[in-house]
Amino acid sequence: QKEVEQDPGPLSVPEGAIVSLNCTYSNSAFQYFMWYRQYSRKGPELLMYTYSSGNKEDGRFTAQVDKSSKYISLFIRDSQPSDSATYLCAMSGYSSASKIIFGSGTRLSIRP
Amino acid sequence: GAVVSQHPSWVICKSGTSVKIECRSLDFQATTMFWYRQFPKQSLMLMATSNEGSKATYEQGVEKDKFLINHASLTLSTLTVTSAHPEDSSFYICSAYPMPEDSIGSYNSPLHFGNGTRLTVT
């Protein structure tokens, strides 16, 4: 079993829809949770990061962490064609020596 | 803030030659930088952790004599692919996070990535 599981997609939704992206994990030591967006042939761009459980909102993006279920989500409201990209979840432990573990990424396509 | 610059963005080289990729933190200092490799439609694979002033730590299965890492300053790490072969063709990405502002706990800033280097070995 991988430490971090993420559905690779592809996920295709119409413009304006609410998108839900998810990851599950098995390591209870994970404390930091991140979401990255990666466009084709570019490096990952940090979207959101949270510490421990809870919600965090930034514009059209909301990140949720449920540590009891070992489940994290990224919601995108009012999705736009420019949101079409691969979304990677990532997580790590508390120590700065902890490795960051990435999900495999979900390819998202927003249809105009 | 927290910008990581990577150069070159793409490079084509002949088999047997060496290629150097630079990774710079532009507006912060980084004692640690990370080098990843990414194949098409796959996630990031950590190759090595670059430590300023000391030897890099390589992940299992990564040849340290082939992928030379030098972290000469707090803002620069280089990855040199030596005697490149077509199977080394890939997307290489570096990353870093700013040094903690205080000594309590772990890093308090997430990982930031460069824009990657696409290497093609012919």
Image (cartoon, coloured by chain):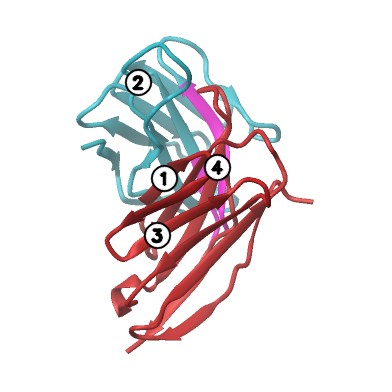
Identify the image quadrant of the N terminus of chain B: top left
Q: CA distance from mark 1 to mark 3?
A: 10 Å
Instruction: Specify the subunit that label 1 lies on.
Output: A
Q: Which mark is residue A91?
A: 4
Q: Indicate the secondary structure of the residue bearing disc 1.
A: strand
Instruction: Specify the subunit that label 3 lies on.
Output: A
In terms of sequence position, does the residue under pointer 1 or pointer 3 come before the other?
A: 1
**Are dots 3 and 4 on a single chain?**
yes
Residue beneath disc 3: A62
Q: Residue at x 60, y 58 (%)?
A: A23
Q: Colour of chain B?
A: cyan
Residue beneath disc 1: A49
Instruction: Specify the subunit that label 2 lies on.
Output: B
Q: CA distance from mark 1 to mark 4?
A: 9 Å
Dominant SS of magenta comes to strand
- Which chain did the image draw in red? A
Q: Amino acid at mark 4?
A: Met
Residue A13 lies in the magenta-colored region: no
Q: Indicate the secondary structure of the residue bearing disc 4.
A: strand
Magenta residues, as a range? B36-50
Given this view, does label 1 or label 3 mark the residue nearer the observer?
3
Instruction: Specify the subunit that label 4 lies on.
Output: A
Residue A25 at what x, y percent from top left? 67, 49
Q: Amino acid at mark 1?
A: Tyr
Q: Nearer the viewer, residue A76 or B35?
A: A76
Q: Amino acid at mark 3?
A: Thr
